[in-house]
Amino acid sequence: MSAPELYPFDAVILLDAALANVKVCGLTIAERARRVATRVGAERVLLLDQTEASGLQAWLGAAEPVGGRALLVIDCTGQIVHMPLLQPLLAASEAGMRVAVDGADAQFAGALWCSPVERSKVVAALMATQPMHGLALATQLADIAKAALASAGPTAITIAPGAIARHPVRTAAERKAAIHFLFGLVRKAQDTWLIRTVNRRVSYPFTRLLLPTKISPNMLSIAVFVIGAIGCWILARPTYWSAVAGTLLVLFAGYLDGCDGEIARIRLESSKLGAWIDTIADEVTTVLFLIASGLHVYRKLGEPWIGWTIVIGTIGALLSIYIIYYYLIVVAHSGNSQDYPSSQGGIASALRVLVQRNIINIASVIFALVDRFATLYMLVALGGIVTAVILIPDHIALRWKRRRSAT
């Protein structure tokens, strides 16, 4: 069993009073450490820079559960930390004391976990430190870690080299480098080549601009939806410039859409609610874009059959969305549409790439500029129908499998 399953645990974060309130990517060093400790499961978190010994002792001794409480101590006097520094300590099954060791140089990485049995020894060593402030306690913590590593037992937990786990922040140059370090959090395994090379490069400046503000990821998701909806409203008009302006707004909303997730990951504000707000707004915008594109072409050309393509294409798009989110809710328990697997391969997988929203947004601007938007609309409507045709067999197979397993 992992540490959180065995024992509830407290977290003590050691801070340098001169650096604790320095902001890096919108969060102070102290607040980032507190959020990291909370996200890995700490029930109580103490930010310690110049706390008196009596106050620390009272905090550590309060609300002691049956069976004891483990302790996680994190040195943030000269570094920022992220989950990969702490998660290996908590995932290990060995009891006693665990010390985070940097995989690059085999040195103490600034985090130590101890079981309730070992906790009293660590607390006693910390309490004996004079003067009682973050820097002195960090030195004492390093000595405790070195002694533990020198003793027998599986105490060293190596942090993988290159993991986004910690970065020094003592100097202005280090803090500048830490910003680039934290921006490594915005990349996702599901990112396509286009997202990595185009979307992320466009969204980065906006993300950096918004990080120090009080704008939350959810607020940004709603703002992106509003911008996209306005773009669709403009696009629905039958003129050349409405097509150009509308598609440009939708394209801009698509680029800005990456910022909410980037801010959430960097500022540690990710949530299931936020993921669903973002993904629902994306899908609604996608359907609105299809309808607005059809209305633009219908009003411009005046052909009655175009109205039927709007209806059929919209039904196909809605059916595809239903199938994808049925899988995400029932099977994957995720709010990210990129988690939907493609079992078809070949042409089906290629088509699925081509109907991705970011590719359609770029293509729509190009077709609007050359005054061939009707062609783009027909491809979008056809894409909605073809996507549904591809996904329906997978959905039927999934429903049949779940019915058989239930019986």
Image (tube, rainbow, N blue to C red):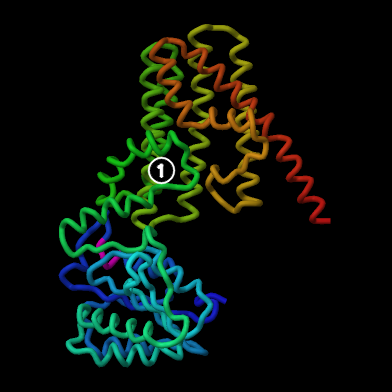
Residue 314 location (% of width, % of height): 60, 26
Q: Is residue 86 left or right of residue 272?
A: left
Q: Quadrant of residue 63?
A: bottom left
Residue 355 location (% of width, % of height): 54, 28
Q: Is residue 381 left or right of residue 142?
A: right
Residue 8 on the magenta span: no
Q: Which residue is at 25% across, 51% downward?
A: 212
Residue 344 location (% of width, % of height): 67, 35
Mark 1 is on which residue type?
A: Ser
Q: What crowding class fits label 1: few (fewer than 14 Cα within 10 Å), some (14-19), or many (20 or more)?
A: many
Q: Is residue 354 above or below residue 400?
A: above
Secondary structure mainly formed by the magenta segment: helix
Outermost residue on the right side: it is: 407
**Residue in the foreground of this view, choosing between 282 and 307:** 282
- Residue at numbered disc 1: 221
**Residue in the foreground of this view, choosing between 215 and 376:** 376
Q: Quadrant of the N terminus?
A: bottom right
Q: Secondary structure at mark 1?
A: helix
Q: Which residue is at 75% across, 40% downward?
A: 396
Q: Which residue is at 46% across, 11% downward?
A: 372
Q: Is residue 379 above or below residue 288?
A: above
Residue 29 on the magenta span: yes
Q: Is residue 365 above or below residue 372?
A: below
Q: Quadrant of the C terminus?
A: bottom right
Q: Is residue 75 left or right of residue 116?
A: left
Q: How many marks?
A: 1
Residue 2 location (% of width, % of height): 53, 75
**Magenta stretch?**
28-32
